[in-house]
Amino acid sequence: MWMEKLSAGVLRVMTPIGARYIKPSFLERLYLVWIFRYFQTLPQQVLSHRQQKLIDRLCTSQEFVSLLSNGFEEAPIIGTIERLLPVIVDDPASDAVPVEQRTRYADQQTSP
């Protein structure tokens, strides 16, 4: 299976507007096969800086392909990168008193 990925594999990029497919060069496919050796799907945040730069460069190069119109309907997918918008989580702990203020308050309570 990895031979098919090396010869004709595509990279799937999940974006907020849907999946996009990129046809990388042979050396880029080789590197991507190594990146996805253990996982089929990875969020971009877990990649190294170098790997993120590669993904950014591939996405900005506008080398997107359509799997149906270009005969890539049977092209193996090397892996999937999730480039979704970051989710902002409301952390209730952020409203808490900082540690420095809590320790000062505790010190004031124990002194006579």
Image: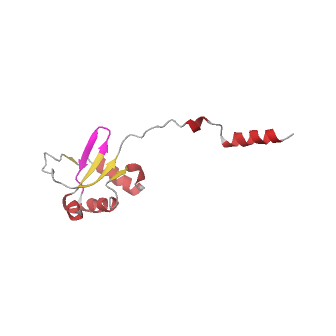
Residue at the farthest right position: 112
Residue in the picture at 36% in, 42% down? 84
In front: 6, or 106? 106
Q: Where is residue 56 in the image (x, y as percent from the top left)?
A: 34, 49
Residue 76, relative to residue 14: is it above or below? below
Placement of the N terminus among the 4 image quadrants: bottom left
In front: 72, or 62? 72
Total marks in image: 0
Assign the magenta stretch its main secondary structure.
Answer: strand
The question of residue 15 being in magenta is answered with yes
Q: Is residue 58 left or right of residue 45?
A: left
Residue in the picture at 65% in, 40% down? 98
Q: Quadrant of residue 5?
A: bottom left
Per the rendered image, the range of residues in magenta is: 14-24
Residue at the farthest bottom position: 3
Placement of the C terminus among the 4 image quadrants: top right
Residue in the picture at 21% in, 65% down? 3
Q: Can residue 99 be seen in this view?
A: yes
The question of residue 28 being in magenta is answered with no
Q: Is residue 39 left or right of residue 8?
A: right
Q: Where is residue 27 in the image (x, y as percent from the top left)?
A: 27, 62
